[in-house]
Image (spheres, helix red, strand yellow):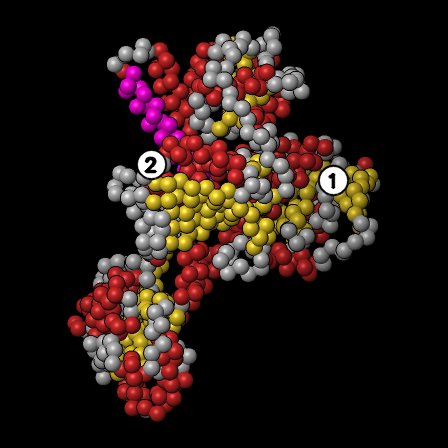
Amino acid sequence: MLRSSTIRGPGGRMQMGREEGGGSSPPSEEDRLAALRRYAVLDTPSEQVFDDLAGLAVRLCGTPIALISFVDEQRQWSKSRVGFEAVETPRQFSFCDRAIRQSDIFVVNDASRDERFAASPLVTGPPGIRFYAAAPLVAPAGEALGTLCIMDRVPRELTPSQAHSLRVLARQVVTQLELRRRSLELAERERLLRTIFDSEPECVKLLDSDGSVRMMNRAGLKMIEADSLEQIAGQRLYPLIAPEQRAAFVALTDRIFHGETGSLEFRITGLKGATRWLETRAAPLRDEAGEVRALLGITREITERKKADAALRESENNFRMLFEQATEGIFVTDPEGRFVDVNPAACTLTGYTREEIAAMTVADLVLPEEVPRVASAIAELSAGQVITGEWRARRKDGCIYIVEVSAKRLADGRLRAFARDITERTQLQAQLLQAQKMESLGRLAGGIAHDFNNLLTVINGTADFAIADLPDAAALRDDLEQIRLAGERAASLTRQLLAMSRQQILKPEVLDLTAVVRRMEGMLRRLIPEHIDLAFSLSDPLGSVNADPSQIEQVVLNLAVNAQDAMPDGGTLTIETRDVDLGVGSAAHPNLAPGRYVLLSVRDTGMGMDEGTRKQIFEPFFTTKEPGKGTGLGLPTVYGIVKQSGGGIWVSSEPGKGSTFTIHLPRVDGVPREAPSAHPAVPVPGTETILLVEDEPALRALTKRILHSAGYQVLEAANGLDALRLAEQHRGTVHLMITDVVMPGMNGRELAERLSRFAPRMRVLFTSGYTDDSILRLGVLDDASRFLNKPYTPSELRRRVRDLLDAPKP
């Protein structure tokens, strides 16, 4: 093990360092010199950053001399010098040779009295060193490369503060050495990559969207007979391409800049007249934001291969063997898309026999909506392009599947396509895309919610005050009522966006879903028109779930309204609750873990939905209603609430046969609490003193007005530090603090903890418009009664304040 030591020797010298007391041995001299060579710093010009560190050492330690030095086999060489002219000194006279053997500060208080250094020319002659102190420059792997040292011409002591400064500065020197080394390595890698780029035997090029050349390696320049990149930079390649193939090249370029990949075979005439056949494989080159910035193409000459292709096509036996044994479906058609031949894998893929396929065209295998794309693809193939794409097709048994096709035109004009079933892969990709989209929407909704909720609190609260101050017959009263209603709708829309993206702050509790639905029965009967029968099939007793009651009510309400809209001519709406147990591998609900659940379903006898609509109903902003009659957030909000509550939701529906939405929420142990009694419409006024902390000026002013209107004394602060000063200066009792949770400098939770030290009986009400996990991390939701989510109304604020003030003393 290592232990710190302070050693005094001849001349009263002091050496602060480490002595070896076990453990791993230090790096060898060979390893140390190898590490020094890796940094490539010896015999290099001075650099400002190292000069600055040497100068800082002089100023911090008050010495006339400072060096940043490195020790190789024969010498001590200085990268930076202050007050010292010699660039290098023989290692045999070097103080640093001793210092690098230490792992901490090495100090010589008076070199003239130290037997190791008294005879050194550096002591007996200029510069006449007496005091010396150095911190070793230790590389990350432990090798001591050199030192950061300070020197004086008179004896002196090194103070602890100066020793600390040397250590810190030495670490900074090593950090700069690492940065310098990495920069050199990066430059070398860039040079190497350029060498590799130019050494590639195939043409590698970057093209802009108009087909002009941005970069091309030497192989590419040779291929088109250009003498230098400057000769063709910014020039389009189209004039070199055979006229009949230019359209295909343009189409390929366009597809690449729309995010696709592709390849093309074409003929060119070089700048000096030579004709070649080329094959290019192209892909989009994207920037960090995912935008396509260039076409990356790898091109090789295929002139000889073109000649060989003719011979290969004559070898029908070999082709037939491959054709018959291929695991992918192979289709050969004439130029109009009529099938000429298919292999056994193609028959397995489609479900048809070879004879049946021979009487069909490509359009007969795909869905009707894919036929125009098929016609376009056949035209592109006839133009010489190589086509890759995905189509939706229908098997003989009626099953719809997705097929990936790669096709090209053969030399005899026929078209050949390779096809494979990618239905499962496509479904997995769609699920991933949906998850990513919901995550993006969540970030967007969460990002705007805080500022939006603050604005809505001010708008709605100010409208309430203005309405209260006007007589009933005032002309402005209706306008203000419309402002308030619009603000309430905006707040509701914000909550729907957050619920849809699973960003809503939930307040879960143990619930009986039957009791929740029964409490809503009166409201639902008033909401649902009389021409629709409302039926209930509610189990009692029913297992409990852990969910936010207000969110579950929102789910029931949204599904009921959706069912009502599906039955414009009347029908029956049935709401059901019951306990269910799902076993392993439940076919109906494969994404739910086995276990006990509570089922909630809403069933209607309306118009129903086709498969296309069913797949999109939970997509944000998707709606089948006329413009202006739906936001497209109702069902996505239901989906988000159910998923955030740990459950699952499914829909079964067919055109003309109605729809059933089925929700499963995990069953939990516990007894639901009784529904709270309604609060009084007007809370009792108060006279207590309230400390209000809010960094948004308009919201702070409104909240102060609300509290004043209820009789409270208000101390207001814009941030945590102001609040601390106010609380310390106030001579009376602060009964309650209302504070925003997320504020610059000091958050609301930290402020409450600091104030509790000298006001332990002060109550605290946290408020916030944020919806992300920062609220959870700060723990302000541990007691729901102490948190008020924005936007809030004046009456909600007055009621919550009165409840907290009247609560039993802790």
> Does 486 sit left or right of 552 as displayed?
left
- Real-space Cα distance between discs 1 and 2? 97 Å
Mark 2 lies on residue: 530
**Residue nearest the viewer, comparing 53 with 683:** 683
- What SS does tag 1 mark? strand
Q: From the top left corner, tell me how far across and down residue 378 is, in percent.
A: 23, 72
At 32% across and 68% down in the image, what residue appears?
393
Question: Is residue 329 shown above or below 604?
Answer: below
Compared to 20, does 235 lie above or below? below
Report crowding for label 2: few under 14, some 14 to 19, many 20 or more residues within 10 A (C-alpha): few
Badge number at residue 317: none
Instruction: Determine if residue 530 is in view.
Output: yes
As rendered, which of 352 and 688 lies closer to the eye? 352
Dots 1, 2 in contact, CB < 8 A: no
Q: Position of residue 717 (x, y in %)?
A: 50, 17
Question: Which one is in front, 160 or 158?
Answer: 160
Residue 694 screen position, x and y as percent: 48, 21
Q: Residue at x 41, y 57 (%)?
A: 430
For the magenta stretch, what is the residue range? 477-504
Residue at horizontal 31 percent and vertical 43 percent from the top: 570
Q: Amino acid at mark 1?
A: Val
> Does the image show residue 221?
no
Mark 1 = which residue?
107
Figure disc tally: 2
Residue 483 location, quadrant: top left
Please name the predominant secondary structure of the magenta segment in the image. Answer: helix
Local SS, label 2: loop
Please tell me in which quadrant of the rendered image residue 688 appears: top right
Q: Earlier in the sequence, mark 1 or mark 2?
A: 1
Q: Quadrant of the C terminus?
A: top right
Circle 2: residue type: Glu
The single residue placed furthest to the left in the displayed view is 243
